[in-house]
Image: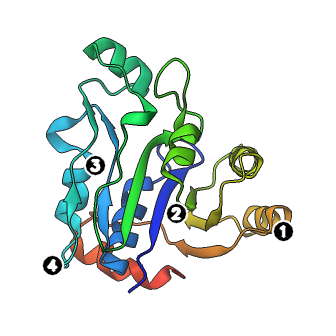
Amino acid sequence: MTSKKFIIAGIGTEVGKTVVSAIVTQKLKADYWKPVQAGDLHDSDTLKVTRWVTNTKTKFHPEAYQLSEPMSPHAAADKDGVHIAIKDFTVPRTDNHLIIELAGGILVPLNHKDTNIDLIQHLSFPVILVINFYLGSINHTLLSIEILKSRKIKIEGLLFNGDVNPDSKQVILEMTGCTDLGSIPKIEQHINSQVIDSHGRFLNI
């Protein structure tokens, strides 16, 4: 088996990266890793995905950094007296597929020099970009894609999460030439393992 390794990035915060990461992880029976967790350590994204993913193959790898405050990683690290160094991120060893979920958007600072895009380049895996629609989301999407392309980072494709604006989706795909990996409908009910498993059918991965 040729293992697939993808970085799940978003056009901003609160676009549904964790839910999407769980759906992709469950569909591929992949391993999951979130390199940086800032805040909510009692109910971290890794713990959420662990609850939602039910296959017996997935392994959940520990975060490289656990930060106590729900802030931008650079600020949370400063408060904890920690320095996040790009060179210290080591990809977990696995023969399985691997889903890597970033903390925040493409240019969220990890320290006072490096941002998530520097981590993406360091890890050197294709990006799945998560998009949801709100006023300004086209701009945020095009900016995210533009900077990924400027760094020659491979974009595996776009995943649309929540209520889809067909006109916005069409223009994004036309202007970027990116692959449409599917549209996940808005999850109205409580998120649980059944919901996560059933929504895998919406993905073209």
Q: Quadrant of residue 78?
A: top left
Q: Residues within 10 Å of mark 1 (few under 14, many from 20)?
A: few
Mark 2 residue element: loop
Amino acid under disc 4: Thr
Q: Compare marks 2 and 4 and give the one earlier in the sequence.
A: 4
The residue located at (26%, 16%) in the rendering is 80
| For discs 1 and 2, the disc positioned in front in the rendered view | 1
Q: Compare marks 4 and 3 and give the one earlier in the sequence.
A: 3
| For discs 2 and 3, the disc positioned in front in the rendered view | 3
Amino acid under disc 2: Gly
Q: Pointer 1: what residue? A: 174
The residue located at (49%, 81%) in the rendering is 202
Q: Is residue 102 above or below residue 203?
A: above
* Structural distance between the alpha carbons of marks 2 and 3: 19 Å
* Colour scheme of the rendered structure: rainbow
* Structural distance between the alpha carbons of marks 1 and 2: 20 Å
| For discs 4 and 1, the disc positioned in front in the rendered view | 4
Amino acid under disc 3: Asp
The residue located at (44%, 67%) in the rendering is 5
| For discs 4 and 3, the disc positioned in front in the rendered view | 4
Across and down, in percent, residue 51 comes to: 17, 62
| For discs 2 and 4, the disc positioned in front in the rendered view | 4
Amino acid under disc 1: Glu
Left or right of residue 124, residue 46 in this image:
left
Image quarter (top left, top right, bottom left or bottom right) of the N terminus = bottom left
* Structural distance between the alpha carbons of marks 4 and 1: 39 Å
Q: Compare marks 2 and 3 and give the one earlier in the sequence.
A: 3
* Structural distance between the alpha carbons of marks 2 and 4: 28 Å
Q: Residues within 10 Å of mark 3 (few under 14, many from 20)?
A: many
Q: Residues within 10 Å of mark 4 (few under 14, many from 20)?
A: few
Mark 1 residue element: helix
Q: Pointer 3: what residue? A: 45
